[in-house]
Amino acid sequence: MAGNFYKVQCQDCENEQVVFGKAATVVNCAVCGTVLARPTGGNATFEGEVTETVEAR
Ligand SMILES: [Zn+2]
């Protein structure tokens, strides 16, 4: 099963950005640069609020 994508809302500027659930690198907000997700061994840790889950197909 492939990893899901998650829509994460930035805590600083409220930008919503789709992030891969198993991101291998730190994901920054495209607008303000705040860290949205940090890689772990498995699923990434999200720093912002996950507003939606987008299933990969
Ligand atoms: Zn932001």
Image: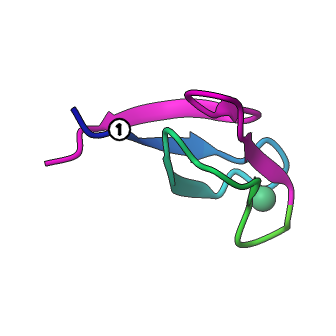
Residue name at image x 35 percent, y 38 percent: 3
Between 12 and 47, the one lying in front of the other is 47
Q: Is 56 placed above or below 42 here?
A: below
For badge 1, the amino acid type reads: Gly
Where does residue 12 sit, x and y in percent of width and height? Answer: 85, 49
Kindly identify which residue carries mark 1: 3
Report the side of 18 relative to 25 (left or right).
left
* Residue ranking furthest to the front: 41
**How many badges with numbers are in the image?**
1
Residue name at image x 75 percent, y 72 percent: 31
Residue 15: within the magenta? no
Which image quadrant is residue 56 in?
Answer: top left
Residue name at image x 62 percent, y 44 percent: 9
Report the side of 45 relative to 1 (left or right).
right
Which corner quadrant of the figure contains ligand 1?
bottom right
Residue name at image x 34 percent, y 38 percent: 4
Which image quadrant is residue 44 in?
Answer: top right
Residue 40: within the magenta? yes
Q: Quadrant of the N terminus?
A: top left
Which image quadrant is residue 47 in?
Answer: top right
Where does residue 24 sit, x and y in percent of width and height? Answer: 63, 51
* Numbered range of the magenta stretch: 34-57
